C-alpha cells in the first residue's frame, strides 16, 4: 500500500466563470522509502500540489491519503521544507530547531532535548553556528537549517518544495549531495518538487512529470534505475543517464508545445491613437488662449 498519495484530486481557486482550476483528476502513489521527484513548468501547480500533500490545502474533489487513510489536516508525520526557508528570524539556529522539537516531542526533558537538537545541528554541519540568527547565515546554511528543523520532527514523509532553486550552482550541488546522504542514512520517503531534469535524475528513484496548467495532472512516470551512490562527476558520461535525461526532457518539451496549441488565442483590439506632434500642441495652446 502506498504511504502517501492523491486519489483523483481536483483543486482550484474561485468559482463559476472566475474559477481557475490548478489540478484536475490528479492521482499519484508514493511508495514507502521511495524518493520521487515531481517536475513541471512554472505555473503548473507544483507548490499547490505540495500544499495538498502536506495538508495545508484541502482538495475540492478526491482525497489525499496517508498510509491508506484520508488526511485533510497537516501533521508532524509529513514534514515540509519550503523554498524560502521559513525560519523564525528572531531565533538562533539552535532555537529554530528546538521550537519544533518541543512541539512534536513535549515529553522530552530539557537535557534530552538539548542533546537531540544538537544532533541535528551536527547532522547538517552547522556545528559552531548554534547561536547565529538566520540573517547571519548564507543561503545554503539557511536551507540546511530548514532541513534540520524538518528532519528533527522525524516525519514519515519528507516534502521538499523546490528547496534548492534559489541557490547558486555550487551551493546547490553541495546540498543535493547532503540531501542524498541524509536520505540514504534512513531511507525516509521523500517527495521533491523541482524544475531541473538533471537534478531529478541525479537524486530520485522515480520522476513524475506534472502537465502544464491550468487543470494540470500527472504524466507517465520515469523510473531511475541508475545504481547508487551516483557520482555527478561521471554521470554525464553514462549513456543510461543521458538517455533518461533526453527522454524526460523530450517529453516535457512535447507537452509544453501541445499545451500552447490548445490554449485559446485572445485578440484584444487596440484603440486608434495618433501621436500629437510638438507643433500641433503649441498651436492648440495658442488657439485656446
Image (cartoon, rainbow, N blue to C red):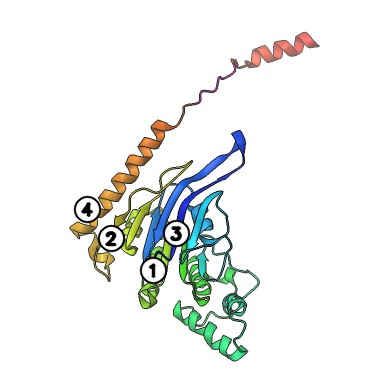
Q: Judge left or right: residue 284 versus residue 188.
A: right
Camera-near label (4 vs 3) is: 3
Q: How far apart, in angstroms, are the residues tagged by discs 3 and 2?
A: 20 Å
Extreme-top residue of the structure: 287
Q: Position of residue 248 (x, y in %)?
A: 30, 50
Q: Residue at image x 55%, y 19%?
A: 269
Extreme-bottom residue of the structure: 111
Q: Earlier in the sequence, mark 4 or mark 3?
A: 3
Q: Judge left or right: residue 153 versus residue 5.
A: right
- Identify the secondary structure beneath mark 4: helix
Q: Which residue bears the numbered disc 1?
A: 32
Quadrant containing the N terminus in the rendered view: bottom left
Q: Earlier in the sequence, mark 1 or mark 3?
A: 3
Disc 4 + disc 1, Cβ < 8 Å = no
**Magenta stretch: residue 268 in it?**
yes
Q: Judge left or right: residue 204 versus residue 119.
A: left
Camera-near label (2 vs 1) is: 1
Q: Earlier in the sequence, mark 2 or mark 4?
A: 2
Q: Which residue bears the numbered disc 3?
A: 5
- Identify the secondary structure beneath mark 1: loop
Q: Residues within 10 Å of mark 1 (few under 14, many from 20)?
A: some
182 or 3: nearer the viewer: 3
Q: Residue at image x 69%, y 15%?
A: 281
Q: Residues within 10 Å of mark 3 (few under 14, many from 20)?
A: many
Disc 2 + disc 4, Cβ < 8 Å = no
**Magenta stretch: residue 111 in it?**
no
Q: Earlier in the sequence, mark 3 or mark 2?
A: 3
Q: Which residue bears the numbered disc 2?
A: 224
The part of the chain drawn in magenta is 266-271
219 or 2: nearer the viewer: 2
Amino acid at each position: 500500500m502506498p504511504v502517501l498519495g492523491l486519489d483523483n484530486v481536483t483543486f482550484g481557486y474561485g468559482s463559476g466563470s472566475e474559477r481557475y482550476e490548478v489540478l484536475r483528476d490528479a492521482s499519484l502513489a508514493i511508495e514507502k522509502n521511495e524518493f520521487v521527484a515531481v517536475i513541471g513548468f512554472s505555473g503548473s501547480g507544483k507548490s499547490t500540489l505540495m500544499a495538498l500533500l502536506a495538508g495545508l490545502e484541502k482538495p475540492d474533489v478526491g482525497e489525499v491519503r496517508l498510509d491508506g487513510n484520508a488526511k485533510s489536516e497537516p501533521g508532524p508525520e509529513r514534514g515540509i521544507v519550503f523554498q524560502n526557508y521559513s525560519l523564525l528570524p528572531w531565533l538562533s539556529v539552535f532555537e529554530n530547531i528546538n521550537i519544533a522539537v518541543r512541539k512534536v516531542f513535549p515529553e522530552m526533558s530539557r537535557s534530552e532535548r538539548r542533546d537531540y537538537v544538537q544532533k541535528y545541528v551536527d547532522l547538517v554541519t552547522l556545528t559552531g553556528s548554534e547561536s547565529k540568527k538566520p540573517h547571519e547565515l548564507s543561503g545554503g546554511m539557511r536551507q540546511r537549517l530548514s532541513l534540520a528543523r524538518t528532519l528533527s520532527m522525524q516525519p514519515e514523509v519528507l516534502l521538499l518544495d523546490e528547496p534548492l532553486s534559489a541557490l547558486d550552482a555550487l551551493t546547490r550541488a553541495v546540498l543535493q549531495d547532503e540531501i542524498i546522504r541524509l536520505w540514504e542514512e534512513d531511507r525516509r520517503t521523500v517527495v521533491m518538487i523541482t524544475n531541473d531534469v538533471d537534478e531529478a535524475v541525479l537524486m530520485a528513484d522515480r520522476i513524475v512529470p506534472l502537465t502544464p496548467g491550468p487543470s494540470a495532472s500527472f504524466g507517465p512516470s520515469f523510473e531511475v534505475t541508475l545504481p547508487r551512490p551516483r557520482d555527478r562527476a561521471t554521470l554525464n558520461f553514462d549513456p543510461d543517464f543521458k538517455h533518461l535525461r533526453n527522454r524526460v526532457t523530450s517529453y516535457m518539451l512535447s507537452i509544453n508545445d501541445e499545451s500552447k496549441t490548445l490554449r485559446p488565442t485572445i485578440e484584444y483590439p487596440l484603440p486608434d491613437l495618433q501621436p500629437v506632434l510638438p507643433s500641433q500642441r503649441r498651436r492648440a495652446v495658442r488657439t485656446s488662449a
